[in-house]
Image: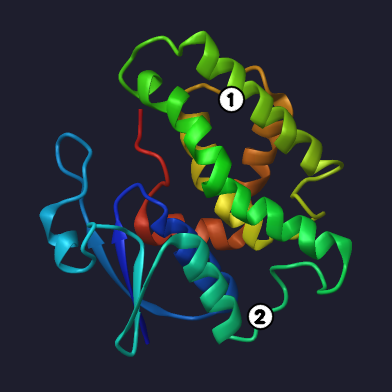
Amino acid sequence: MITLHALQYSRATRILWLLADLGQPCNRIGYNRTDDFRAPDELSKVHPLGKSPVIDDDGEMIAESTTILRYLAAKFDDDTHTPPRDTADYWRHEALFDYVEASFAEVAVRAIMPAFQGNPVPDDAKAALDTNLGYIARAIGDGPMLFGNTAMLADIQMSYIIALLARLGLLADHPKIAAYWDALQEQPGYIAATRAAGPMAPPA
């Protein structure tokens, strides 16, 4: 059985979501955040950088949520969380999947951090966030997910950052993204994951 090292209010919920969709159990080891919202020292014993999520699959330690999601999809021969291969949608999916942490996360953090501290979001950070949320809204198209009615790996990957933005009221000017967040929260895998580990974003 896979062991998941899962930090509270973190990207680890993405992994629980996919495992729930695949009907695969895991041994979840939970770690609470410190009073200043950091990862505890115990996670440094799991990964040199104190990262979460990390999975242990029969001694094979794998970090980075994008890599873990791809690994699990391959391990369990899952083809339900990506569009069919050798299609334009497949490669569009792969680009969006990588975009989340390669591009979107950095932009989002510039707005999330001041908002989390109760400070106004700088104008340049707000403008960059608006541009990216507009890009995602166009990618959703008719929705409700990025590729129709079924949550793909890219949707699971997107969910954590969208959850933080929603928690901080940063989707107020983006009704299509707010509706996307509502749809994400209705997905069975999301429901199972958050019932097991608590919400993606810290409570208000």
**15 or 191, which lies in front?**
15
Residue at 46 percent across and 30 percent down: it is 167
Looking at the rendering, in which quadrant would you find the C terminus?
A: top left
Residue at 53 percent across and 13 percent down: it is 124
Q: What is the quadrant of residue 35 in the picture?
A: top left
Looking at the rendering, in which quadrant would you find the N terminus?
A: bottom left
Is 176 left or right of 19, judged from the image as shown? right
Is 16 left or right of 44, judged from the image as shown? right
Find residue 41 and report its horizontal and vertical position in percent. 11, 55
Label at residue 62: none
Badge 2: few (under 14), some or many (20 or more) residues near its Cα, within 10 Å? few
Residue 151 visible (yes or no)? no
Mark 1: secondary structure: helix
Image label count? 2
In 3D space, how far apart are the residues under numbered discs 2 and 1 (Cα atoms)?
33 Å
Label at residue 129: 1
Task: Judge depth for marks 2 and 1 and give the one in front.
Answer: 1
**For the residue marked with disc 1, what is the amino acid?**
Leu
Q: 167 above or below 121? A: below
Is 46 left or right of 179, judged from the image as shown? left
Q: 103 above or below 107? A: below
Find residue 119 and report its horizontal and vertical position in percent. 35, 11
**For the residue marked with disc 2, what is the amino acid?**
Asp
**68 or 37, which lies in front?**
68
Q: What is the quadrant of residue 190 in the picture?
A: bottom right
Q: Earlier in the sequence, mark 2 or mark 1?
A: 2
Q: Which residue is mark 2?
A: 78
Q: Disc 2 vs disc 1: Cβ atoms closer than 8 Å?
A: no
